């Protein structure tokens, strides 16, 4: 199963350096253009399932992509929301300022991200392969074709949420890392992370590999216009 994790498009608060967190802000015109570029890039991808944070900047990004996939119902879940930053939301971060006491702590965010990911994976465990009765694998044509078609799921979320997920899957779950991936690259608006996951029935666990991180190939000619001020307090890894 291929998981396409996407960050939402740009908002005016991104441009102004205003902390958003759970503040519900829409995409700006540039963010919609970014999302349309993303949609063009993914239009020939056979998406089987789509999830999004319910915050409008993520939801609208997902909806723009799904215009090319009209049969896919978008699922919303609070577990995919951005980190809540409490009284810091709606204003610029002061120099050297960390998340306030009423913000969601980095540990609380990790617990929420982990909770959603565990729930998602547990609901996607594939059926146990049928045992062979003649020394060969099941040769049913429909089963073979289904196995060859890898399921693709798109999940649209936020910068701090995706950074937290990356920490979870690379350190806690110990998913492998493709040699092509550079984890130092910043997670810009509409950037893509692709994770290939497979369930091991014998060990009753998921294995995975991070195939892409911070992929913005669809925005190459827009990079100079993609400037933004960091929107999340800098204590995310504490």
Image: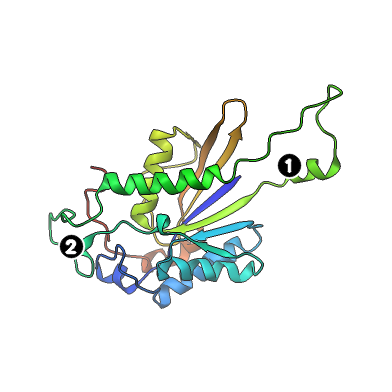
Q: In the figure, is residue 43 to the left or right of 87?
A: right
Q: On the rendered image, what quadrant is the C terminus found in? A: top left
The residue labelled by disc 2 is 93
The secondary structure type at the circle numbered 2 is: loop
Q: Residue furthest top?
A: 135
Q: In the figure, is residue 140 to the left or right of 31?
A: right
Q: On the rendered image, what quadrant is the N terminus found in? A: top right
The secondary structure type at the circle numbered 1 is: helix
* Residue 147: assigned label: 1
Q: Disc 2 vs disc 1: which is toward the camera?
A: 1
Q: In the figure, is residue 100 to the left or right of 144?
A: left
Within 10 angstroms of label 2, few (less than 14), some, or many (20 or more) residues? Answer: some
Mark 2 and mark 1: Cα distance apart in space: 49 Å
The residue lying toward the viewer, choosing from 152 and 104, is 104
Within 10 angstroms of label 1, few (less than 14), some, or many (20 or more) residues? Answer: few
Coloration mode: rainbow
Q: In the figure, is residue 68 to the left or right of 132?
A: left
Which sits earlier in the primary sequence, circle 2 or circle 1? Answer: 2
Residue at 63% x, 57% y: name it.
Answer: 47
Residue at 56% x, 42% y: name it.
Answer: 196
Residue at 46% x, 65% y: name it.
Answer: 221
Above or below for 214 versus 39: above
Residue 123 percent coordinates (x, y): 56, 46
* Residue 180: assigned label: none
Residue 157 percent coordinates (x, y): 43, 58
Residue 16 percent coordinates (x, y): 25, 71
């Amino acid at each position: 199963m291929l998981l396409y994790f996407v960050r939402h498009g740009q908002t005016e608060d991104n441009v102004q350096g205003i902390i958003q967190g759970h503040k519900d802000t829409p995409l700006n015109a540039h963010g919609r253009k970014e999302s349309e570029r993303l949609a063009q890039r993914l239009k020939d991808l056979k998406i089987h399932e789509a999830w999004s944070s319910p915050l409008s900047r993520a939801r609208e990004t997902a909806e723009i992509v799904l215009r090319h996939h009209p049969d896919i119902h978008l699922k919303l879940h609070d577990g995919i929301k951005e980190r809540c930053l409490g009284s810091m939301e709606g204003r610029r971060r002061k120099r050297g300022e960390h998340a306030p006491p009423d913000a969601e702590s980095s540990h609380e965010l990790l617990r929420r991200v982990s909770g959603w990911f565990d729930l998602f994976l547990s609901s996607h465990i594939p059926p146990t392969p049928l045992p062979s009765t003649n020394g060969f694998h099941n040769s049913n044509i429909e089963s073979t074709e289904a196995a060859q078609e890898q399921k693709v799921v798109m999940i649209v979320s936020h910068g701090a949420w995706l950074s937290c997920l990356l920490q979870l899957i690379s350190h806690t779950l110990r998913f492998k890392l493709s040699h092509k991936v550079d984890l130092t690259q910043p997670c810009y608006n509409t950037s893509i992370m692709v994770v290939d996951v497979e369930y091991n029935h014998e060990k009753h666990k998921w294995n995975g590999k991070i195939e892409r991180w911070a992929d913005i190939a669809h925005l190459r000619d827009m990079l100079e216009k993609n400037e933004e001020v960091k929107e999340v307090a800098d204590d995310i890894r504490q």
